[in-house]
Amino acid sequence: MIPLCSPTDARKPTALALGSFDGLHAGHRRVIAEAIENRPENVVASVVSFWPHPREVLFGEPRLRLDLPSEKLDLLKPLGIEQLVLVPFTQELAQLSAEAFVETVLLDTLQARQIAVGANFRFGRNRSGDAALLQRVAAARGVSVGVTEIVEDADGRMSSSRIRSALEAGDLKTAQALLNRPYRFQGPVVRGRGLGRGLGWPTANLRVDGRKFLPGLGVYAAWAWLNGTGERMAAVMNLGPQPTVDPNAPSAVEVHLLDRSLEMVGQQLLVEPVLRLRGQVKFSGLDALSEQIGRDADEARSLLSSQTGVG
């Protein structure tokens, strides 16, 4: 796995792609390729992002991520990236002028030898910096800046927002096409109240990082991997509250492995939702709920059995 580091701990000098790169869609991958191709020998291929998201610090807005930094490491390595550098975004950093950010962070601290950004990238105090300013300041130090135009497909510009919208709608097929990979999330299995087991449908209760973007509420056919590796297991997943069992309970991620019985508490479970089967419904009672879960399980089993191979 490639390292995750701060600017002061990064290997230098660097060839860097600058941006959030949340979701690593086709537009992001093009910026990264621009940043690192034809780089000089011994220059470290790097992605540089801010953490936390600037809007969290400046406006207190929670910003859920398609990919948490730890997840992004495995995604960046096949692209030729050798390190992910997270610039701590603070109120102090927010007050830096765009010129000072380029000079102190990119050129001095990271010793950038070549840089790439997307055409719509903004940075510096009050977002005053743009690609043209970055090119001008870097050029004065002999550093080239590649600016990648927005990538579009038949439905419009490639963007993290489109991916989030597809996931929110439970449209995993569109999300996968935009990401060029399945959407997955993981978390430790924690002990629940045993309500599913009491209904005859034991579930693994996942504690997913609260900064991770999850698909829209509903019931999904899904694949699951214990500790993120090994055998792919068919599952049905409920994402959301429990309107029949406990209407006041918070949203949860509950995964029932089909035709398997494993003790998973304390272990990591990686989940890949495949198809949204239905929305959430409040049933007349526990018997009706149990019967519907049985139908959900049958539908998920049929769907997943048609898919072969291991992901």
Image (cartoon, helix red, strand yellow):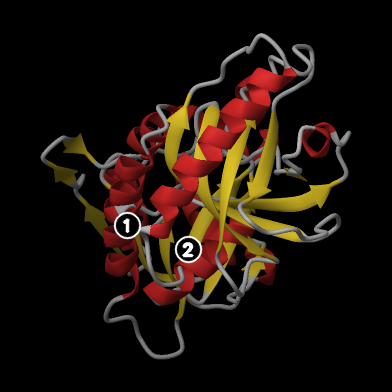
Q: Is residue 6 left or right of 163 when viewed as pictured? A: right
Q: Which mark is residue 47?
A: 2
Q: Callout 2, which amino acid?
A: Val
Label 2 Cα crowd, 10 Å radius (few <14 / some 14-19 / many 20+): many
Label 1 Cα crowd, 10 Å radius (few <14 / some 14-19 / many 20+): few
Q: Callout 1, which amino acid?
A: Asn
CA separation in Å, label 1 and label 2: 19 Å
At x 62%, y 12%, the residue is 282
How many numbered marks are there? 2
The residue sitting at the left extreme is: 154
Q: Is residue 182 depicted above or below 170 in this figure?
A: below
The residue sitting at the bottom extreme is: 41
As helix, strand or loop, the secondary structure at mark 2 comes to strand
Q: Which mark is residue 266?
A: none
Residue that numbered label 1 is attached to = 180
> 226 or 79: nearer the eye?
226
Q: Quadrant of residue 92?
A: top right
Q: Is residue 278 depicted above or below 260 in this figure?
A: above
x, y percentage for residue 63?
Answer: 58, 32
x, y percentage for residue 271?
Answer: 58, 52
Q: Is residue 100 depicted above or below 114 in this figure?
A: above
As helix, strand or loop, the secondary structure at mark 1 comes to loop
x, y percentage for residue 178?
Answer: 30, 47
Which of disc 2 and disc 1 is earlier in sequence? 2
Quarter of the image with the N terminus is bottom right
x, y percentage for residue 239?
Answer: 61, 32
